Image (cartoon, rainbow, N blue to C red):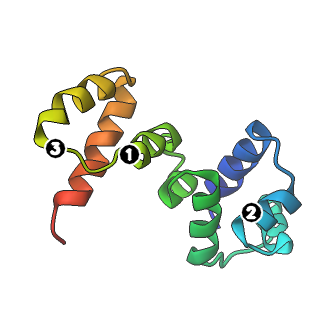
Amino acid sequence: MENSIRKQLARLMRERRLSQSALSRGAGVPQPTINRILSQTTLDLRRDSVVRIAKFLNVTPEYLYNSGPDVSATTEVLNAVEPVAIDQVDDICRQVMTLTSLQRSQVLHRLLELVVVK
C-alpha cells in the first residue's frame, strides 16, 4: 500500500478531529481496516474501502492515493448547483469566479467529466 494513503488519511482525520471509530462508523469501513491503513500493515487495500472513506471525507479516492488537491470545496459547490435555465448561467459563472483558481479548475474538470460521453 502506498504511503500517501496513510499520510492523507491521517491528515484528514487530524484536521476533522475524527477518531478511527468515528471514521469507521461514518464510512462503513471496519475499524481494524482503518487501523491497518494508518499503521501500514495492509498491502492489499480494497478499492471499495478507499471509495467509502473518500466519500465520507468528501474527497476523491484519487486524492487519497495521489496526494492531489482537496476537492471538498469544489464538491460542495457542484452539489449545491441544481438544474438551471440558460439565463442563469451568468449567475453561476459569477459564483464560480469567487473560488480560488485551483477550485475553478476542479469545477471545470468535474463539469467536463459530466458532459463527456465515455
The residue that appears at 70% across and 44% down in the rendered structure is 12
Question: Mark 3 — residue?
Answer: 85
Q: Which mark is first along the chain, 3 or 2?
A: 2
Question: Mark 2 — residue?
Answer: 26
**Quadrant in which the C terminus is drawn:** bottom left
Disc assigned to residue 49:
none
Q: Which mark is first along the chain, 2 or 1?
A: 2
Q: Which mark is first along the chain, 3 or 1?
A: 1
Mark 2 crowdedness (10 Å alpha carbons): few <14, some 14-19, many ≥20: some
Instruction: Say if mark 2 contacts mark 3, CB within 8 Å.
Output: no
Q: Position of residue 96 (x, y in %)?
A: 31, 29
Question: Mark 1 — residue?
Answer: 78
Q: CA distance from mark 1 to mark 3?
A: 16 Å
Q: CA distance from mark 2 to mark 3?
A: 36 Å
Q: Position of residue 88 (x, y in %)?
A: 19, 34
| Viewer-nearest residue: 79 or 14 | 79
Residue type at mark 3 is Ala
Residue type at mark 2 is Gly
Comparing marks 1 and 3, which lies closer to the viewer? 3
Residue type at mark 1 is Leu
**Kind of element beneath mark 3:** loop
Up the image or down, 4 lies above or below 40; here it is: above
Q: Position of residue 113 (x, y in %)?
A: 25, 57
Mark 3 crowdedness (10 Å alpha carbons): few <14, some 14-19, many ≥20: few
The residue that appears at 59% across and 59% down in the rendered structure is 54
Horizontal side of 117 relative to 71 (left or right) equals: left
**Quadrant in which the N terminus is drawn:** bottom right
Horizontal side of 19 relative to 1 (left or right) equals: right
